[in-house]
Image: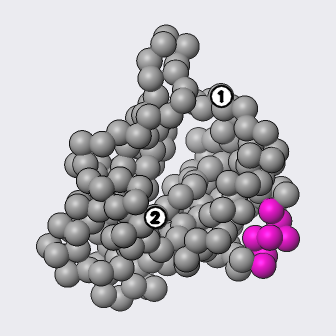
């Protein structure tokens, strides 16, 4: 049985060591194969926890911690600092849909043992339902995914998340075994 919990920051911190381990396992395996150090994972999570509106959802499979999703609020200025074209898209969508609130889904990951079991889909649906009830006037949700991560892209599309036409791809420092450069691309969903 899969259970999704909207965890408090304090509850997240109590489980943070386990979450950091799952993060390393999730990104260390297929399709990522990234070997993060414990210190890098911890520092990245600590940075995210400091962001405005940081919130987390945890997934449990038969009582065992299996995955996580976290997000935070963003502003046009913060998006502009990251990628100016993304800020322009946000402004256009904000005007078109009369929405001023925005969030960035920063991480969604599942322990490889539980891949393809619907956990990521349930995490995302719980998150989107939460946004619907939290932002009655609407919210624009942004996320980014690796262009080669077809599993995450499939889950996102099932949830109504669309490719964000920024024309910008953020390059990681990784290449595939075939020598291809790996990119992150931005995606979004209007929740109203």
Q: Give how far across and how far down residue 41 sits, in percent.
A: 73, 49
**x and y percent of residue 43 in the render?**
73, 54
Quarter of the image with the C terminus in it: bottom left
Residue 79, which numbered label?
none
Q: Residue at x 23, y 60 (%)?
A: 89
12 within the magenta span: yes
Q: Is residue 37 left or right of residue 180?
A: right
Q: Is residue 138 left or right of residue 145?
A: left
Residue 10 appearing in the image: yes
Q: Can residue 1 be seen by looking at this rendering?
A: no
Prevailing secondary structure of the magenta residues:
helix
Please state if 149 lies on the left or on the right of 57 as rendered. left
Residue at the location (49% across, 11% down)?
178
Check disc 2: other Cα within 10 Å, few if <14, some if 14-19, many if 20+. Answer: many
Q: Secondary structure at mark 2?
A: strand
Towards the viewer: 154 or 101: 101
Task: For mark 1, give the secondary structure.
Answer: loop
> In what quadrant of the picture does the N terminus appear?
bottom right
**Which image quadrant is residue 122 in?**
bottom right
Q: Is residue 159 above or below residue 179?
A: below
Q: Is residue 159 above or below residue 148?
A: below
Q: Is residue 169 above or below residue 72?
A: above
**How far is mark 2 from mark 1, CA to CA?**
24 Å
Tell me where residue 177 sits by quadrant. top right
| Residue receiving disc 1 | 33
x 35%, y 39%: residue: 169
Q: Which residues are magenta?
A: 10-16
Q: Which mark is residue 104?
A: 2
- Of labels 2 and 1, earlier in sequence is 1
State the scheme by which the image is colored.
one colour
Residue 41 lies left or right of residue 31; in this view the side is right
């Amino acid at each position: 049985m899969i259970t999704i919990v909207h965890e408090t920051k304090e509850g997240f911190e109590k489980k943070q060591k386990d979450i950091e381990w799952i993060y390393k396992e999730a990104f260390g395996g297929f399709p990522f194969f990234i070997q993060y150090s414990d210190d890098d994972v911890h520092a990245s999570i600590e940075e995210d926890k400091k962001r405005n509106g940081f919130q987390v959802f945890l997934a449990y499979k038969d009582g065992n911690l299996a995955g996580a999703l976290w997000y935070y609020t963003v502003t046009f200025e913060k998006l502009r600092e990251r990628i100016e074209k993304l800020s322009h898209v946000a402004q256009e969508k904000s005007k078109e849909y009369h929405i001023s609130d925005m969030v960035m889904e920063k991480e969604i990951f599942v322990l490889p043992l539980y891949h393809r079991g619907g956990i990521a889909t349930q995490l995302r649906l719980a998150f989107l339902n939460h946004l619907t009830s939290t932002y009655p006037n609407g919210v624009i949700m942004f996320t980014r995914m690796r262009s080669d991560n077809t599993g995450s892209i499939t889950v996102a599309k099932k949830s109504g998340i669309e490719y964000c036409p920024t024309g910008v791809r953020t390059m990681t420092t990784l290449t595939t075994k075939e020598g291809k450069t790996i990119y992150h691309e931005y995606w979004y969903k209007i929740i109203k």
